Image: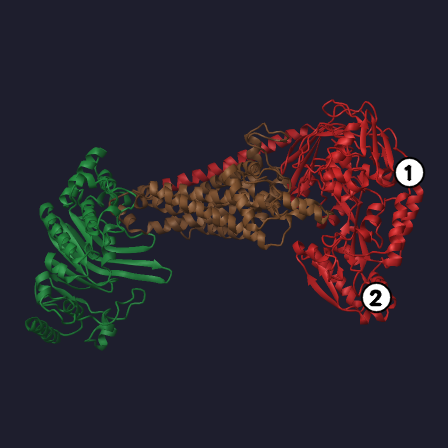
Amino acid sequence: MPALEVKDLATTFHTDDGLVKAVSGVSFSLDQGKTLGVVGESGSGKSVTFLTVMGLVDPRHAQVSGSVLLNGEEMLGASQARLRQIRGATIGMIFQDPMTSLNPVKTIGWQLEEAVLIHQDVTRKEARRQAIEILKEVEIPRSDQRVDDYPHQFSGGMRQRVMIAMALINNPEVLIADEPTTALDVTTQAQILRLMGRLQQEHQMAIVMVTHDLGVVAELANDVIVMYGGKVVEQANVDDLFARPEMPYTWGLLGSLPRLNAEGSRLEQIPGQPPSLLNPPRGCPFNPRCAFVMDVCRTDLPELRRSDNGEEHYFRCHLDDETRTRTWEAKHAALVSKDAAA
Amino acid sequence: MRRKQLLSMFMLVLGVSLLVAAMTVGAASSATQKAGKTGAAKGGTLKLNESSEDFDYVDPQIAYRTDDWSMLNVTAMPLVGFPEKSGVAGTQLYPIGATSFPTVSKDGKTYTFKIRPGMKFSDGSPVTAAAYQRAIERVLSPKMGSPVGVNIHLQDEIVGGAAFLSGKSAHISGVSAKGQVLTVHLTSPNATFVTQMGMQWFTATKPNTPYSSQGLNTFPSAGPYYISSRDPGRSTVLKRNPYYKGSRPANPDEIVFTPNVDPDQSLLQVKAGQADLDIVGNVPTSSADLAKTYGVNKGRFWVGASSCVEYMSMNTSRPPFNNLALRKAANWAIDRPAQVRLLGAFGGQRTDQLLVPGIPGYKPYNVYALKGADVAKAKQVGGSAIASAATINFVHTTSAVSTNRAQIAEYNLKQAGFHVTDVPTPATTFYQVVGAKDTTYNFTSNGGWCADYFDPYDYLNVLFDGRTIQANNNVFYTYFNNATWNSQIDKAALLSGAARASAYAKLDQELMVKYAPVVPYVVVTEHFLTAARVHNWIYSTYFGDPYYNALTVG
Amino acid sequence: MTQFLIRRLFWAVFLFFVATIITYLIFWVIPADPAALAAGKAASPADILRVRHFLHLDRPIWEQYYYFVQNLVVHRSLGMSFVNRESVDSIIGKDAPVTASLVFGGAVFWLSLSIPVGILSALRPRSILDRITMTFVLIGISAHPVWIGLILSFLFGYKLHLTPIAGYCNFIPGSPGAQCEGPVQWAYHMILPWITFMILFAALYVRLVRANVMETMSEDYVRTARAKGASERRVMVHHVLRNSMLPVVTILGMDLGLALGGAIFTETIFNLPGLGREVISAYNADDLPVITGVVVFSTICVIIFNLIVDVTYGFLDPRIRPS
């Protein structure tokens, strides 16, 4: 049984300006000890997807459909009380900005203890012991003293370690990391990612790594979902995706990946802006920015179809197989030659 | 979530119920107050408001405002004074602290008062002639810095007054007290002196009362009441003097003055019976409604003339108003009823003379147009001089009332053919502008006079004696100085009784007919609302207030 | 902490000089002559000169200011009133408690009203409660206290006989001449003034609380708390409220300090003998020492309350705790 299984998830918000279809048709399954990478630009719906999974979208403003199974238990439609039991215990979440994600007027010890006390029937003393323990585990030096410090006394990387500690303190089976390294400098990013890798091995957690950084995905993930305009546009095993991406947006993402051995050359970028969710383009959401756009792209949304390259490899694109193969191979060759030239 | 809301709702309900509880307590206590009412004529507490102001001083030798005086009158034991009676009877001076009017020496310079024996201060000590000597000395002492004595030039009237005022002598040589006999030597004969002695300033004052430039707040007094406590800005409380044995009324047990009340709130309080009277009067805009509801002088709403006359002044020392014809023309041109209407219903009575009703010598004349502007007559009287007259420099202060008044007056003057320049001047500089002898102003719509003492001298001699003109700080802006007139008023001042009254009546008319330095237009009217429980209303034109000691409550 | 206090103290002294010098300068610019007023309506120039000398008004303005400062520093005295020659110290000493009972009583009312209502509004934006609240806020902010005061007096005092129309009773009994005294009468007479004084502030604070709570609820750390599995109640109490009350504390401190300088309209309407009414009568009488006294007192109040806010804030918010 997968640790987390999502089927056909859709989230729609009611706003003053009308309905916003933030996410639709998201399905995946994630096994114990595995990592799912979720890639996309801001506004692609990746954060909303996992706030929905956590049950953190406001039910007064959002309409949710589909199914979220956590260890086989349906989360959508579960009572608030049950959701509260699960959140922070079975499933933990880390957020993007460690500078704002901690309560500034409480010590980090208090905030860690709170997480313990909500889910475990233990004394405050025991909760404090656990807090110091987990701080040690996330490699915060002098954790028995720093436990009484306030968030503003920590650096950004240290705060993200605290956030991780807080998510892990109740030993969750699933950890959702929503862009955990985006706000950090490169050195710290690497440290945090290494830490997460180590902790995953030790705790045998399933991790969802939401990111816009394909590099992070390449390093950590087993499977990848590429999201665009609130839809899954490509979904595959990480090797398959990097070896043979099937649609123009993913090509663009790969092209914009910085390469260590390509100093001086300009990064490719995808022209245009991500689509407005309030007023999405007809047809394929990527069509306004797509270099290979055809008439059909402007009218019909391509089905999520299976690729012949790799098991369980899905994508959305109207381009026929031959064109895609030819185009990718040309693009790939260019990328490789650029590498070689350097 | 639910519990949070419940908690908040609970706090809200708690707040509201606290409020309701506090109000119920209040309602209950006011209910018991109502139940405690009795119908006694004597006794009780008279609750008086004083809207928007407070007494500046309550020390009788410093206090200089008419509201101070009507309060101090209740505590005072002057040598002579006015009886607590309405109408003409109330304007007849009679001896109070003295056994009779003073005996005057043949040369008219020495006045001898016999002090009534057996009178006592509120602390039980006896009233002797020394008490009146002390009063005069406190009025003039340099240690007091009091404005009152110098205002009537008392230092020049009494022998040794000037030396005492400048600190050269410890006592006034012209005033001596022996037992119950007070002797005052004057520098020259002065028929006004007795009336002046009727002022609150000269009330019996304990001989050991200290000199104090700050003024005393409480002190023993010999009148029907004494000030039992005073908290400036908060309250002044008068209690009946247990040692007072005279015949003046002393009806309430206690008289409480609450100052600085908002005028609208004060009116509400009187209507609701939470206060008995606002001594400043009701809000002018409410008079018409009050008259409709309660009638005029029929038990609740009271209207009475004051001693205050308002007039517009012309600068007689420079063109164009050095020309008598033009001054007369202005007197015909001004629309008096329009000016009175500005004061609101019951705001005043139109007039064209200086003396006010009730003053000895007052006789209504009809020299000019009382019913409205008479443009034709103005043009006829002024003749061609109006057209050739220089443009009038019309100065007025900038309050709303002043500006309205000036606009109407300017319109009237223009109607008659004058050229007018409007010069609005803030009150702070106004007096410097018009008070300087070499001023360039020609006409001002600001000005008026209330009696210091209830005698025609205080109007005709004080306001129009050109020999008193100073270089600066003049309070009379006509700069009128006529030798004939001066000798006439000097002569009238020496007269007394009926001769005095008829002499001043003649002068009052002559001033406006022969000289016309001012345009009198209104005798200000006081208007008051009393609470339902207040009775025995006796009004004093001199004070412009009722006699508080005569009022009854309950 | 010591350095912090010393810096504050310097700032306070500076503020004191700025405020008093401005007051003196304004009086110097306005062509008023308090001596002429004090001397009486028919005073001769010599009389006015005498009074002017007596009041030091014949000295240049900087010398008058020097006398004022000297008097304050050496004799700890604010001088005496031009009008009735009463000591300004004792005037302020008597007035301050009245204004304090209005301001602090009003503050209790407006806080206990605006905090729960503001929170409820924030929890349910666009609900009927929220819409009604926001309507009242608009009225409360727009309506002048004089109007509110007169309407309340007319309604509750005159028509319904539930409250006095105006007037003040001392909280502590025993002052001579008092017509009413004691806590019950005091509170009974203060009900309408409190409400009048409260309405504007309640409106402002409802809006403030509502905005702060809404803003705090969208903070990342609130989401973190929810992700931990915290109940809504726990989220509100431990994460939203304390953080959203921080700006309220600052503004409350400033408002209290300012309001102590004189709640002019409410005091005038309800005849409360406090600083506000005092400064109005002093202004009408060109009574510079009293005006300066109230200015000095308000300045001190503002400084003290800002200090209290700073210190309290340090306790409430670890980020700015002086270490």
From the top left corner, tell me how far across and down residue A57 is, in percent: 29, 53
Q: Residues within 10 Å of mark 2 (few under 14, many from 20)?
A: many
**Considering only order in the chain, which callout, 2 or 1, is on the residue closer to the N terminus?**
1
Residue B548 visible, this orientation: no
From the top left corner, tell me how far across and down residue A122 is, in percent: 21, 34
Q: Quadrant of residue B40?
A: top right
Q: Total of numbered circles in the picture?
A: 2
B312 is higher (above) or lower (below) than B67: below
Q: Is residue B108 left or right of residue C11?
A: right
A18 is higher (above) or lower (below) than C2: below
User: Which is closer to the viewer, label 1 or label 2?
Assistant: 1
Q: Is residue A65 left or right of residue B181?
A: left
In what quadrant of the picture does the C terminus of chain B appear? top right
Residue B503 visible, this orientation: yes
Name the mark on residue B375.
2
From the top left corner, tell me how far across and down residue C238 is, in percent: 32, 42
A114 is higher (above) or lower (below) than A101: above
From the top left corner, tell me how far across and down residue B216 is, in percent: 67, 33
Q: Quadrant of residue B262?
A: top right
Cα–Cα span, label 1 and label 2: 52 Å
Q: Is residue B1 left or right of residue B241?
A: left
What shade has chain C been given? brown
Chain assignment, label 2: B
In this figure, which residue is indicated by the disc labeled 1?
A: B107
| Callout 2 amino acid | Val
Name the mark on residue B67.
none
Q: Tell me what residue is drawn at x 34 percent, y 40 percent.
A: C2
What shade has chain B been given? red
